[in-house]
Amino acid sequence: MTSRAEIEGLFAALRRGKDLDPDGTLSWGYYFVDPDPARLQAAADVLTGAGYEFVEIFQDREDEESGRWRLQVVKAERHTADSLEGRNAQLAGFAARHGLAGFDGNDVGPAG
């Protein structure tokens, strides 16, 4: 899971940049990993019912080597470092309750 220092570094980088307003609504991407893509699809179905948008289930080069699959969902939200830390903890708990190998962090982009 993303550490508090990494979250604070992300917000500091957003404040230094000119492309994204860290105080506004942004598109937050969240990632889950598991060796079974069907288990990820089942998790995606639950998450979409909770307001997240399904993006894809995929493997990157590192995933192919490890046999792991990755689920990406997004949600337009406003976050502070505290709320993002809370969201990450919530999603890590979701991954554990649904038998996934793990929650693999987040990224951020423009909303819309």
Image (spheres, rainbow, N blue to C red):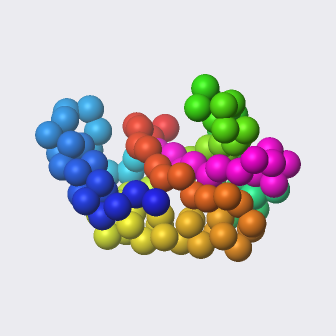
Residue at the far top in the pictured view: 61
Q: Is residue 64 left or right of residue 9?
A: right
Residue at 23% x, 51% y: name it: 9
56 or 104: which is nearer to us?
Answer: 104
Residue 47 drawn at (x, y percent): 69, 59
Q: Is residue 60 left or right of residue 104?
A: right
Q: Is residue 107 left or right of residue 45?
A: left
Q: Is residue 45 left or right of residue 104?
A: right
Residue at 65% x, 50% y: name it: 33
In the displayed structure, 4 sits above or below 97; it is above
* Residues rendered magenta in the picture: 27-41
Residue 1 drawn at (x, y percent): 46, 60
Residue at 66% x, 70% y: name it: 96
Residue 92's quadrant in the figure?
bottom right
Residue 67's quadrant in the figure?
top right
Residue 43 drawn at (x, y percent): 75, 58
In the displayed structure, 95 sits above or below 37; it is below
